Amino acid sequence: MFFTLEANDPRSNARAGTIQTDHGAIETPVFMPVGTVGTVKGVSPKALNEEIQAQIILGNTYHLYLRPTTEVLNAAGGLHKFNNWHKPILTDSGGYQVFSLAAMRKIKEEGATFRSHIDGSKLHFTPENVMDTQRLIGADIVMAFDECTPYPVEHKEARKSMELTHRWLKRCHDRFHATKPLYGYNQFLFPIVQGSTFPDLRKESAEYMSEHVTSGVAIGGLSVGEPEQTMYDIAGLCCSILPKNVPRYLMGVGTPANLLNNIALGIDMFDCVMPTRNGRNGMLFTTKGIVNISNKKWQFDFSPIDEGLQNDTSQNYTKSYLRHLFIANELLGLQLASVQNLAFYCWLMREARKKIIDGTFTGWKDEMLPIVTTRL
Amino acid sequence: MFFTLEANDPRSNARAGTIQTDHGAIETPVFMPVGTVGTVKGVSPKALNEEIQAQIILGNTYHLYLRPTTEVLNAAGGLHKFNNWHKPILTDSGGYQVFSLAAMRKIKEEGATFRSHIDGSKLHFTPENVMDTQRLIGADIVMAFDECTPYPVEHKEARKSMELTHRWLKRCHDRFHATKPLYGYNQFLFPIVQGSTFPDLRKESAEYMSEHVTSGVAIGGLSVGEPEQTMYDIAGLCCSILPKNVPRYLMGVGTPANLLNNIALGIDMFDCVMPTRNGRNGMLFTTKGIVNISNKKWQFDFSPIDEGLQNDTSQNYTKSYLRHLFIANELLGLQLASVQNLAFYCWLMREARKKIIDGTFTGWKDEMLPIVTTRL
């Protein structure tokens, strides 16, 4: 069994489960730190294991294809051997990067043609070659190649794009199942529900994906600028349609409050650059609320970064010291803030899982929401 | 006993000893990673302990005075509590920074007046207030306030400066012994031999310091642009005069070869920004030689960063991966390269110590010199 559903919250659609991969089990709900080019920015695999207790990290096919290249990754024996991370990895398909980063993109039936954001070289991604690339990268979970629409978008455009994504899924599926993993362990393909913010399209796409899902399914095209309530409405709609026996991954989401609310709707997996990116800007997510560590108010605060977390970084460095590191532009500040934020995100998911299993998730979530949104 | 001399190499002036401080023992020869503003750039105390096995780190009085300020350090209970490093710390006196960083400096009998390199504010350092500052910082070993001359300098200027440094030493000594440590552990004051590259002045200064040394002594004003052989000649001359029962610290030196050659002359302690600064530029010091990790030749090299070292970073990441991190401008590259270089420097000192104790130092040094200077 790829996914075992272990508990349902009695007062919401929150679920707890376990995903089995050849690189180990993943307990859900789970947050996946983003390791764009094969490294979670500023954070070592050792810290991911010991301090953050990450269960799975994400890599970006588009970025890894450009650097270090699939030639290097293949020679290394896959991404796990290359980057010294031996637990599960998920790679996105590049669809989102084509939408958000690439210049001069042209989307046709065959695939997407665009220019590299690094050197302007011309690239051509198709459902087939994106599957081949993800075979070469060697992630445990790979994503179908999709088109991600901007927000807002006309209904007509969103339909056209969704239908293309559906046709591309079939091609992804065919290529994926016509090829084999290269490094001796299984890989699993997740399709991606699209349809922008239109309930009729999302319903249609979720129904389509429900018929074609084999191991897990993602919801893409959210967290691209739409109102928060719209994201919840669409995620909730998708969850009400998608089968219960596969994990549901909401791509690119979000704040701690977003995670808690989406768990309540039935989402199992998340990824987001927010904890690392905001961390590098001095914004800390803690068990007591949000801290802008560069603020003068922390200059003489010798309390731990986060008393509520048990890892070395949160416990053994003070707010005063971390503020000093940010004011002095020291690298260690970026490292400590990134570890703190990822440790908090992963802790929040572990706590959510416990509460779901205990049957107390909804009450706990209602207590946590005002805390995680408080600015200290 | 502050310093116990344990072994002398039969074929050189190399020595092995142990320095006792209230934050633990320091086995010499020792390399001190530089933690300018209270952090070794890009390296956590955890990595310093576990991977690098650093025994003592250095802080800069000038930098710490500006940021986080002595007010914050005092409120924290001293630098060890502030930066989560619980082994020994040495602080320099600011003399070198006044020489190398400060704008519009005026050196008078009373002290040095200059402007901050951060905000241009006017600062006044005297032997007395530098002692007070180092009491507030709370390092285990503190340095006398000295004037560091540029290279080259006229003999007359060098004499004038040296004599000022000698007079300042008396004032440092008086103030240091008229005050007490603030945080419940002992502090030790090291004077600094000056005299530029003039043997007569260095002899005079070393003799003066020999009369005034109480725990350890430093040699300053070298590694400021003079020829390498001149540095060795002056360091050797100073060592021939300085008492044998105190540790000798050669400030701001140097390459691995510099360290080995100066150990042979009788130096016990070193510090240098080279391993971290060059590491951040992709220059690795390894047990096999020097690696420019950004070079294309490492793209497909999946051997460990340094098979000769046993720590996590050197063993479990490949040259190919570290090259990728540098090419992609990833923070983790700076971190891993800094750990590798400091681990190598500290390993080199531990090996040197073993060989001195075994009586095989000179032969080992002659084998190591061509290795540590080879560019791979």
Image (spheres, coloured by chain):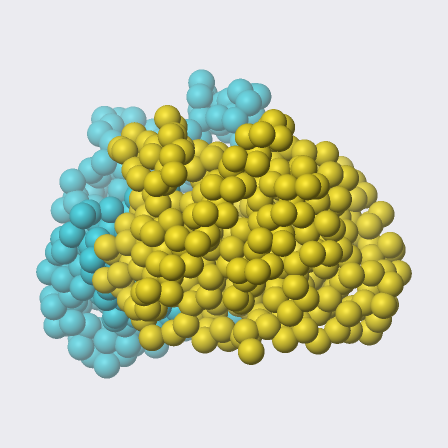
Chain colours: A cyan, B yellow
Instruction: Tell me if residue A267 comes above or below residue B295 in the rendering.
Output: below
Which sits in the foreground, A108 or B20? Answer: B20
| Left-right relation of A365 to B338 | left
Residue lying furthest bottom: A358
Quadrant containing the C terminus of chain A is: bottom left
- Residue B161: x and y, percent? 51, 37
- Residue B344: x and y, percent? 67, 57
Residue pictured at 32% horizontal, 65% vertical: B179
| Left-right relation of A87 to A203 | right
Q: How many numbered marks, from 0 up?
A: 0
- Residue A49: x and y, percent? 48, 66
Residue pictured at 35% horizontal, 58% vertical: B175
Residue pictured at 27% horizontal, 42% vertical: A223
- Residue A70: x and y, percent? 64, 41
Residue A121 in view: yes
Residue lying furthest top: A104
Residue pictured at 61% horizontal, 66% vertical: B246
Residue A83 in view: no
Which sits in the foreground, A190 or A206? Answer: A190
| Left-right relation of B364 to A310 | right
Which sits in the foreground, B305 or B339? Answer: B339
Which sits in the foreground, B86 or A283? Answer: B86
